[in-house]
Image: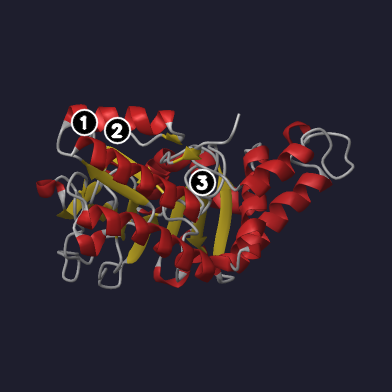
Amino acid sequence: MARVYNFSAGPAVLPEEVLREAADEMLDYKGSGMSVMEMSHRSKVFDQIIKEAEADLRDLMQIPENYKVLFLQGGAHQQFAAVPMNLMKNKKAGYIVTGQWAKRAFNEAKIFGEAVELASSADKTFSYIPDCSDLPITDDMDYVYICENNTIYGTKFWELPNTKGKDLVADISSCFLSEPMDVTKYGLVYGGVQKNVGPAGVVIVIVREDLIRDDVLPGTPTILKYKTQADADSLYNTPPCYGIYICGKVFKWLKAQGGLEAMKVRNEEKAKILYDFLDQSKLFKGTVEKKDRSIMNVPFITGDKDLDAKFVKEAEAAGFVNLKGHRSVGGMRASIYNAMPKEGVEKLVAFMKKFEEENA
């Protein structure tokens, strides 16, 4: 069977070259006589895999030496708790609520201290990014938290909030490695890799060393302390070895494509093709304020639920899968991550034009 164009928000499309390479190495990784799935995380072979993956990620993102890179489990949801447990020294932090995942992180933080909602876009179904130039940040706040790209609602912080000197913490799950980013503007960033980097099961945390401390909140499990994981080079317990191995291959693939500058150009080109069509379409329309549009996740609607359902069904039959919007918002959503080829977006738009002619 031919491969489909997979527009899933995550787990999501991976580069075909990476999948083929992994398939070739499935039974015997580089003469070891076994699969990476079977090898000890303490072995020399795996030690090289994880060290090379970290080196390539540092190179891609130009991560400074005073930031630690941790390959962990538990996804972004576990970080909703780990962040306040490790960083809420004064038991107070500011949260900017721009979607469901930021809201969940905000609610989780309330368990551990005073989480303050600094700004929100809930009033317009999270269809925009609020003005964050002058937020009510107080001196006793430990950090300011954002979800940088909102997977469900298709919005993106194109300008980082003015944190008034407080450390910025960002969930970058769905914009991870889609463009260059200046890591020094953040105290901590993390991302579940299943959207743009690898298979589900790995979360990567990039944290400035001075934020890795012993004096975390009482009751913090040993395994959730960044210090525990940093001191053990992500090997305190068995890490998600196979997932890290695939991430490492994706890092090499990204470098071969020309790095993050090249990916940014490609991603902007792909998004423009889809947004240009939506802006002139008489049937389909985007749901996000133009200035805040994500180039990774593009939600759109027809305005008619039955027609939306018909579109999703016919699109799937034509080889365009996982276009149904998140259950909380409905409509459609095309996630066009790094590994989605430009031709996939072009063919989707051609299909949308045909559907519009037949259903206008």
Image quadrant of residue 333? top left
Q: Quadrant of residue 63?
A: bottom right
CA gap, disc 3 and disc 2:
29 Å
Q: Which residue is labeled 1 in the image?
A: 307
The crowding category of the residue bearing disc 2, from other C-alpha atoms within 10 Å (few below 14, some 14 to 19, many at least 20), is many
x, y (%) of residue 97?
22, 50
Q: In the figure, residue 238 lies in which quadrant?
A: top right
Q: Which of the two discs, 3 and 1, labels the residue nearer the N terminus?
A: 3
225 lies left or right of 352: right
Q: Earlier in the sequence, mark 3 or mark 2?
A: 3
Mark 3 highlights which residue? 193
Image height check: is 289 above or below 113?
below
Residue of label 2:
311
Are the residues flagged by discs 2 and 1 in contact, CB closer than 8 Å? Answer: yes
Per the model, the C-alpha gap separating discs 3 and 1 is 33 Å
**Mark drawn on residue 128:** none
Q: Amino acid at mark 1?
A: Leu
The C terminus - image quarter: top left
Mark 2 vs mark 1, CA separation in Å: 6 Å
